[in-house]
Image (spheres, rainbow, N blue to C red):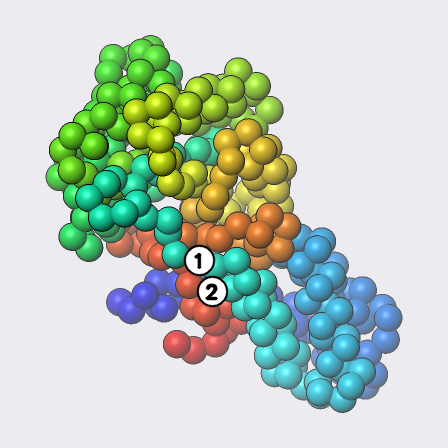
């Protein structure tokens, strides 16, 4: 299966929702008026594009329509697609890899149930498949079986896991893992942290502590802080992203569970509000279903385009 096919399959529910709304909204309408555009904006917000992105897409469509550039639903879809692609591409960038010979440390954060630990296992699989030496750090020492879950992923994809006993100090595990990654010449170290709600101050403070400890061992690290976002929650994740960005210095996003939701517009909402890149998208349960995020593939899949 091609990468684009994975995106198209994962975003199928959202694509159907958008297509039906676009085709039905303007059916039989001879002239579009203020109510028409208000309905369009409401539909986009309902599909979890967020207020800011929905307003921008609607404004672009209205401007093109008033200049005579839109006459059909196909024209409408093309303009919306162009605007969404621009939003998703504007802050797109490569991963901030460490210089050759040093490990790239990625701190993984997110709320309970967002798919963080599973994503780490899939990231380990992806990068190992691409010739990288990967290590995992089990710093979620509070959740029952969290360490075991990461160790199972380590066995599954054949990468080392640095861990300690249940209830151990997460910062201590992060210290040991960073030291080991440096000593063993690893290319990548993914640090799993305890899932936490964005309003749990003590746990958010713990993230800051882990960052400080890692930096003591390796001053340039962490090079990235990635927030896993459960796409099935739709616009509810905006507050999560806001708090995590402030507390943990989030540098990028991992979108999970896109295959089971009709709320794929949420990715557009996050990009428009936070100006953060998305690095990977979870589009299924298999390891290969976590794919590098592509604004072009995402947009084409969302609006029924082709590869």
Residue 274, percent across and down? 60, 48
Residue 93 badge? 1
Left or right of 175? Residue 237 is right
Query: Between residues 239 and 301, which one lies in front from this camera angle?
Result: 239
Residue 6, percent across and down? 35, 63
Q: Which residue shows up at 22% across the image and 48% down it?
A: 100
Q: Which residue shows up at 30% across the image and 25% down it?
A: 217
Relative to residue 108, is residue 7 depicted above or below? below
Q: Which residue shows up at 30% across the image and 45% down it?
A: 98
Relative to residue 9, is residue 144 depicted above or below? above
Residue 281 badge? none
Between discs 2 and 1, the one toward the N terminus: 1
Query: Between residues 182 and 293, which one lies in front from this camera angle?
Result: 182
**Would you call the spot at circle 2 few (<14 residues within 10 Å), some (14-19), or many (20 or more)?**
many
Query: Between residues 250 and 222, which one lies in front from this camera angle?
Result: 222
Q: Secondary structure at mark 2?
A: helix
Q: Which residue is mark 2?
A: 295
Residue 130, percent across and down? 19, 55
Q: Are marks 2 and 1 in contact (CB under 8 Å)?
A: no
Q: Secondary structure at mark 1?
A: loop
**Quadrant in which the N terminus appears:** bottom left
Q: State whether residue 135 appears in this view.
A: yes
The span from disc 2 to disc 1 (Cα, nearest Å) is 11 Å
Q: State whether residue 48 appears in this view.
A: no
Marks 2, 1: nearer the viewer: 1
Farthest residue, direction right: 34
Relative to residue 85, is residue 105 depicted above or below? above
Question: Count of labels shown?
Answer: 2
Residue 55, percent across and down? 74, 61
Q: Which residue shows up at 23% across the image and 25% down it?
A: 179
């Amino acid at each position: 299966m091609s990468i684009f096919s994975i995106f198209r399959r994962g975003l199928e529910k959202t694509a159907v929702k958008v297509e039906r709304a676009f085709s039905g909204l303007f059916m039989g309408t001879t002239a579009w008026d203020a109510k028409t555009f208000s309905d369009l904006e409401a539909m986009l917000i309902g599909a979890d594009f967020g207020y800011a992105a929905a307003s921008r897409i609607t404004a672009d469509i209205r401007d093109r329509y008033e200049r005579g550039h839109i006459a059909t639903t196909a024209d409408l879809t093309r303009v919306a697609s162009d605007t969404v692609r621009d939003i998703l591409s504007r802050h797109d960038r490569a991963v901030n890899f460490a210089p050759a010979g040093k490990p790239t440390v990625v701190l993984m954060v997110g709320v309970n149930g967002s798919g963080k630990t599973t994503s780490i296992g899939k990231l380990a699989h992806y990068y190992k498949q691409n010739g990288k030496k990967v290590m995992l750090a089990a710093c979620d020492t509070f959740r029952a079986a969290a360490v075991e879950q990461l160790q199972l992923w380590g066995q599954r994809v054949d990468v080392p896991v640095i861990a300690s006993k249940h209830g151990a100090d997460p910062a201590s595990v992060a210290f040991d893992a960073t030291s080991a990654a440096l000593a063993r010449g690893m290319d990548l170290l993914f640090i799993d942290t305890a899932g936490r709600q964005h309003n749990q101050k003590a746990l958010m403070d713990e993230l800051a502590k882990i960052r400080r400890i890692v930096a003591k061992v390796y001053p340039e690290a962490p090079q990235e802080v990635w927030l896993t976002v459960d796409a099935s929650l739709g616009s509810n994740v905006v507050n999560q992203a806001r708090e995590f960005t402030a507390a943990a210095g989030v540098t990028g996003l991992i979108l999970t569970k896109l295959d089971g939701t009709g709320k794929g517009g949420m990715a557009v909402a996050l990009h428009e509000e936070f100006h953060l890149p998305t690095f990977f998208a979870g589009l299924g349960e298999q390891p290969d279903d976590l794919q590098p995020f592509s604004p072009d593939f995402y947009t084409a899949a969302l609006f029924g385009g082709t590869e």
